[in-house]
Image (cartoon, rainbow, N blue to C red):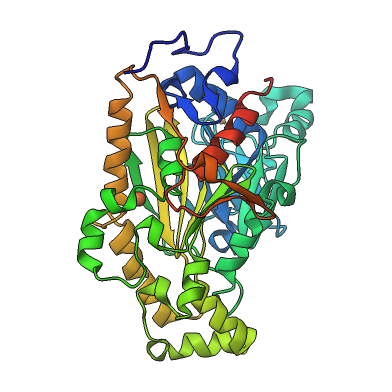
Amino acid sequence: MTTMESTPTTVPDDFDVARIVQNDRVHGSVYTSPEIFQREMDTIFRKGWVYVAHESEVSEPGDYLTRRIGHDPVVVVHGKDGKIRVLLNRCSHRANKLCNAEMGNANSFRCPYHGWTFSNDGSLTAVPMRNGYGEAFQKVRSELGMAEAPRVDSYGGFLFASLAADGISLQEHLGNATKAIDRLLNLSPTGTIDLRSNWMKHLHHANWKMVVENNVDGYHALFTHASVYDAIRPAKVSHIPSKVDVVVRDMGGGHSEIDYSAEYRKLDEEFVWYGRTPREKLPEYVAALEAAHGPEKTHDSLVVGPPHTLIWPNLFLAEMNIMYVEPIGPDETVAYTTAALFPGQDRMNERMLRRSEGAMGPAGFLIADDGEIGMRNQAGLAARDPEWLRLSRGLETDVKDETGIVNSDKSAETPQRGFYRQWASVVGQEI
Ligand code: FES
Ligand code: FE
């Protein structure tokens, strides 16, 4: 039983992040307080870089998607001028949400309220009954295009946007996390992936951080996913953390990962990450990869496999699945997942889709377990004692190297500590 401390359950005016996030623990209010949630929207999601879409989803002029950056609805659209923009999904007249479809292809967006029409580059092109604006019409029209995220950039096809005009570049934001994207793209003969097989949506009754930090938790799998291990036993790669060369890594900037590469290199066996499919079963794929990268690099890529990496704040490279999360409220989150497909590799893609459904689908064997755990975490937080959640596992065995802070015990809470170090530095800033 912990002693009750004078810690806040809501955010006071003199918000002091050190009172709710410390090196080895996080206060429960971080997951439950509406004020903290709002502060996250205003800082993490309005000031920093946030993953919004993949270029393959808007590859043709006119292609668009509706997404959210925190709570701000946006349209990611490939304009007729060839430029991909992230436009705020709000009519500049009286705020109606302009575009309701999840995706499509359109030259323009017409507001259903009073019929104002905007081109797919965001400019206002038509205003019904324009005489009502008198002499000022041209000025109104030129000033009232759709608002645009001031910064949009991409790496390896992953599109990120920032609603703030100033700040660090995307490259600086991603830091070491670019290596994880490279690791995924090394598996593609074209060096690109395709995320157009549509997204599975899971509503989690949990705070968005519960969903995200669980993705890089190397401690829970044996317990939360016990049924999976019962089904695949005996496996060559043990999932008992002390028996494997698997490290967890805080890559800095809130990015973190579980890295299986040392264990896989030790085994020196291809496709361990892919159910040990023999390369003879995927001849077109292996041949295309060898043609693109040569036999040596191909062998290494097939041994090492894809990343298991969280990219701050909302993107998770879940090996051959991609996940992003949308926070809805303090205790509600939508997680979107899809399979990463390789252009032109139909046979490989077919298998990836089936595997993705098996792991991440509504009747899948992984995400459903994690969803229930997240919900039970949130339910447990209603009890106010103890007030803090512990993140001290492996604290004394963390080692700093050029890749970040690394722990050779897969079950260490190193990724979570890195996540909350970043969280504190962003959420604690003046707004
Ligand atoms: Fe869109 Fe009036 S609110 S046209
Ligand atoms: Fe899990």
Is 369 above or below relative to 45?
below
Q: In which quarter of the image is the N terminus?
A: top left
Question: In this rendering, does residue 38 appear at all?
Answer: yes
Can you give x and y, in whole percent of width and height, for residue 326 in the image?
A: 46, 40
Left or right of 79: which side holds 187? left
| Residue at left offset 70%, top offset 55% | 402
Q: In which quarter of the image is ligand 1?
A: top right
Question: In this rendering, does residue 60 appear at all?
Answer: no
Can you give x and y, in whole percent of width and height, for residue 259 in the image?
A: 51, 60
| Residue at left offset 79%, top offset 29% | 139
Residue located farthest toward the front when viewing the structure as drawn = 396
Q: Quadrant of the C terminus?
A: top right
- Residue 137, located in which quarter of the rendered image? top right
- Residue 87, located in which quarter of the rendered image? top right
Can you give x and y, in whole percent of width and height, for residue 236 in the image?
A: 34, 73
Q: Which of 345 and 169 is in front in this view?
A: 169
Left or right of 137: which side holds 146? left
Is 57 above or below relative to 95?
below
| Residue at left offset 40%, top offset 32% | 207
Can you give x and y, in whole percent of width and height, for residue 403 in the image?
A: 65, 55
Is 419 above or below relative to 156?
above
